[in-house]
Amino acid sequence: MSRLLVYDEQGNLLEKVENFEDIARKLESIGVLFERWDPKVPLSEDAGEEEVLKAFEDDIKRLMDRFGFKSCDVVALTPDNPKKDELRKKFLDEHTHDDFEVRYFVYGDGVFYLHIGDKVYVVHCEGGDLISVPPNTPHWFDMGDKPNFKCIRLFTTPEGWVAKYTGSDIAKKFPTYEGILQLS
């Protein structure tokens, strides 16, 4: 189930939201787009990039037109990936991007932590969810120690995913992916 947990900067839980429409409204109030997409045709987990992009072409075009995205791709990570630990570590430190960070979860899940003002918005995204983190928003991402997801990514810049690390250790104050999943 998708969920939003709102914390103060010390890691104290302030609010828990589990209704999709309420999550979308709350995130919209801080400039974050959160949507649910359905494919035109059913997709299997082994669907290739072309098949995935075709299944969501109308939604992708709508966002490309709205935000000026220039490219998109599909990435997948499975528990048997030999670089999974290295990749997880890369995303766990607070960082920003000059570009949006847009992820549509075709399947699987992950947790985005958005540090906005004096709060941290923790968004557990699952298959069917799209999140668009605005440029220059401090955030981090946790995919767990056994990542298993496929995502569509959209970019406005040709460089794609380029992180600017903030140097903050704030991420250490919050539950990891595994801890978020245990919260009921």
Image (cartoon, grey):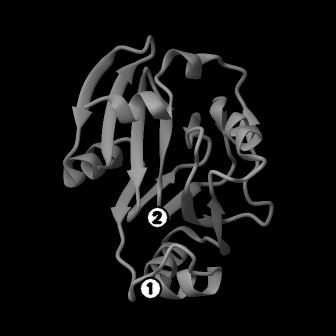
Residue 172 relative to residue 164: left or right? left
Residue carrying label 1: 58
Q: Residue at x 35, y 30 (%)?
A: 182
Near-viewer residue (98 or 74) = 74
**x and y percent of residue 4 in the render?**
32, 39
- At numbered mark 1, what does the secondary structure look like: helix, strand or loop? helix
Task: Look at the image and tell me in which quarter the C terminus lies.
Answer: top left
From this view, report whether residue 87 is shown above or below residue 33. above
Residue carrying label 2: 107
Near-viewer residue (163 or 157) = 163
Q: Quadrant of residue 86?
A: top right
Query: Considering only order in the chain, which callout, 1 or 2, is on the residue closer to the N terminus?
Result: 1
**x and y percent of residue 67 in the render?**
53, 67
Near-viewer residue (59 or 180) = 180
From this view, report whether residue 58 is shown above or below residue 25. below
Q: Residue at x 61, y 71 (%)?
A: 69
Q: Residue at x 52, y 78 (%)?
A: 65
Mark 2: amino acid: Tyr
